[in-house]
Amino acid sequence: MIRPPWDFEYRPVHAETSGEDTCFDDLILASEGPVDPAQLAQVLGQLAPDLRIEPVLDWHPLYWTRVRSGCGLEPAECEQCLRAGGMAVRYLASAHAASQRLPPALDLSGCLPMRASQWQTRGPSVLQETASAGRWFVDSCGVGVDRRACGTGAGTRLAVIDNDAGEVSRLDLDNHILVGTDHVPGGSSHAALLVAWAVRAVGGPGKNGGGDFIGVAPDASPRLYSIPKPGNDVFSFPLAIVRAVADGADVVVCATNVDGQWSPMLDDALELASHLGRQGRGTAVVLPCGRETSSPEGSVHSSLSLGAGEPAADPRVFCVAPSGRDGGWFLWRDRRGRLHPFANRGPALRWLAPGDDVALPFSSPEIFAHAESSGASAMAAGVLLLVLGQNPKLTLPELEDALTRTVREVDPQLPSERHALADPYDILPLGRDRDGHNAKHGYGRLDACRACLLVSDPIASALVSLGEDQAALRWAEVRNEQPGFPSGYGRELGHWAARVLLADAGQRHAVCASLRHLRLLAARPERLRDQAPGALLRVVMMVLRELPRSRQAPALDAPLQRELVAIADRTRAAALHPASTTEMEERMGLLAAVLWPTADNRKVAREGNSFTPTVELLGA
């Protein structure tokens, strides 16, 4: 039998889940509105006289109440009793046992989007960023950070959910919030590592040499939400997500062990995050793929499978696996020289981020350690923060699309995955689906620079779509050198236009076609004379006219609409005069020389004047 290229030993080792007819001594009641504890005790008193009732969450649209009894309670019986008593029940679920039950959808009508009120963001800082062997995770072998395009994540907020507090004194946290616990052990530095790799740590390896440990998005504002250790309950984790989203988090990452902890409460939390988080644009939730090396019954192979019932497999979660220094799946070598994977595979995996040996943030001199899938999820969260820092108006689907469209493809059969394997089954599958997905690598390895360029500006976005990353960077540098562009377009209009190109394939093609014209002019500047006079200018005018008419275009507020109309009016006025038309098209040729410098066109570009009129031409 020939194994299909998408197949692997998909044998998840899953936790037992609760049944509807099981008795529990600890339940979460989810109601459609506020609950009167006295009424609840009266209605359920006939089933259990020793009730203990504790409000957990009373915040529209989520109302959770904890109900405990030493006698044991059956959820179905309790729900029937409550409905008979006139109480609006959404569901009852165990506070401790996992359940695959899908609850009724939340009624989000009339809900206000979440926005931060007490969580302050940070402005951009002057970084003292030093390259080192252990900081490869931010370079081209890692997540590909280029500060010219990516910035520092200023203006964004990161929530880290974990169950320890070691080394938190080395972090510049906005706040440390306890959820479902009054004590957080400090035995390990797991949570602190996540914050440091995603953002920064105070006085890391560079303390004696000058500077903090700089992570992926060093100017993001982090908060730590500490929860009880896994196994204590299944509602503290979703409660922490709700709290972080309500506080205004842009990105939430949790790398503590929540495997096997699916619950209706987690469904509520993810629904709230995706629909109401970040002022209604959606809060990103990032989880690691985990690692299951147990052998399922009847198999001699490690599971290494992310099952459909795990929290990280939920489609509203961004699931991340670790990559190695060669860009492929992270494999580690045992004492006998055999290679083993350090991550689960599965249909729900999204992306890769570094998980090989990276610098420990709290060690000097530099010490390396496996970041594994936990560190990979933190670095992926940092990439999301950088992208949102470049375009804060992105919706959650737009953010996901931008990241997936700009990944670096990974060869499913890298040499490192073919030799010295402890078990050849561990590196299956060996093929990619037509959409580029592979169960080990997801859609590919995150590339922060590409993603930030794609969302920041329509010209940069189209250039990245063409595969012209260096030209996109040159354009970003031109934009940064002339902030504001008095005769061109501003940053906010650029953000809007980039979102149009993300959503509308036709508009994206129009801008890409314009840039393909310019690329051909860059190779041979004299080709401009072979075009019909005014043809290139007409293409630009067409783009300016059609962008706001796109059916997929996001709403354009009045100031941006006036700015766009003014640019179009100036361009049309120039097109009425042959001399102005010729001048503008020549300046388009000069811009091409800047984006694609060659030996033949560098002299032309140096002798050209300001590029501001060209920016005006291509301004939306």
Image (cartoon, helix red, strand yellow):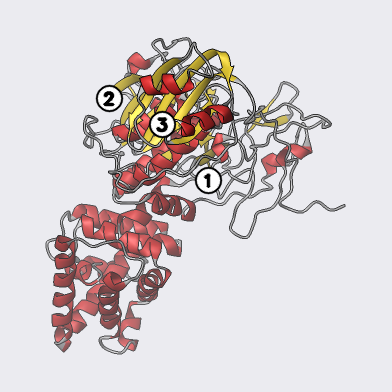
Q: State how far apart marks 2 and 3 are (Cα).
A: 17 Å
Disc 1: which residue? 315
Q: Is residue 489 above or below residue 21?
A: below
Disc 2: which residue? 174
10 Å crowding of disc 1: few (<14), some (14-19), many (20+): few
Which of the two discs, 2 and 1, sits closer to the camera? 1
Q: Position of residue 89 (x, y in %)?
A: 45, 35
Most foreground residue, 508 or 25: 25
For image coordinates 35% across by 58% down, the residue present is 472
10 Å crowding of disc 3: few (<14), some (14-19), many (20+): many
Which type of secondary structure does the marked residue at label 2 adopt?
loop
Where on the picture, by quarter, is residue 59? top left
Kindly identify the amino acid type of the residue bearing the numbered disc 1. Pro
Q: State how far apart marks 2 and 1 are (Cα).
A: 30 Å
Which type of secondary structure does the marked residue at label 1 adopt?
loop
Disc 3: which residue? 241
Question: Does residue 583 show up?
Answer: yes
Q: Position of residue 604 (x, y in %)?
A: 26, 71
Q: Are marks 1 and 3 in contact (CB under 8 Å)?
A: no
